[in-house]
Amino acid sequence: MKRFLFIGVILSAILLYSPFTHAQAVKKAGTSTAAIEKLAQKRTQLLKDELFLSIDQTDKIMDINVDMLKKLDNINKQNLEKEARKKQVAQVEASTKNKIVSLLTPAQRQKFETDLFSQVYETKIDKKRAVSVKK
């Protein structure tokens, strides 16, 4: 009888604990998405302030920034060697830059390409180059 009681208590504890662990996993995933959205918003706002973007440009650039950050997050989750990771990050950055440039006016494009891109989209891999461009 004690054995059945003990097994019942263990099963109850497992059943009660599993919703909490699932909620924590969902919360962690939500935090990651929220962090991506927050950083994308920050970058978009910086570009909006510096380039005087229209509402349409701002919305499209926000989508581009979210997409870029999700791709970078996926790259970081992969178990890649440094050179392979660097190559993939560079491809994502180039693609992002091209998408954004296509949305800008010539005056905005000039300011964006001269130094704003490296300030806004600085990566850990490319930090030395980006810092030297800032100065």
Image (cartoon, rainbow, N blue to C red):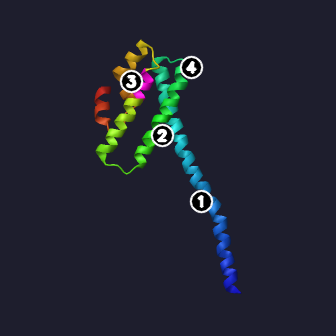
Residue range in magenta is 96-101
98 left or right of 58 in image: left
Q: Amino acid at mark 4?
A: Ile
What residue is pinned by disc 3?
116
What's the distance in space between the residues labelled 2 and 1, CA to CA? 24 Å
What residue is pinned by disc 2?
70
| Residue under the point 30% across and 46% down | 82
Earlier along the polypeptide chain: callout 1 or callout 4?
A: 1
Earlier along the polypeptide chain: callout 4 or callout 3?
A: 4
Q: Amino acid at mark 2?
A: Lys
Towards the viewer: 128 or 19:
19
72 left or right of 28 in image: left
Q: Quadrant of residue 118?
A: top left
Earlier along the polypeptide chain: callout 3 or callout 1?
A: 1
What's the distance in space between the residues labelled 4 and 2, CA to CA? 23 Å
Label 1 element class: helix
Q: Amino acid at mark 3?
A: Leu
x, y percentage for residue 55?
A: 56, 20
Label 2 element class: helix
Q: Is residue 8 visible?
A: yes
Q: Quadrant of the C terminus?
A: top left
What residue is pinned by disc 1?
21
Q: Quadrant of the N terminus?
A: bottom right
In this rendering, the label closer to the viewer, 4 or 2: 2
Label 4 element class: helix
Q: Quadrant of residue 102?
A: top left
What residue is pinned by disc 4?
55
What's the distance in space between the residues labelled 1 and 4, CA to CA? 41 Å
Earlier along the polypeptide chain: callout 2 or callout 1?
A: 1
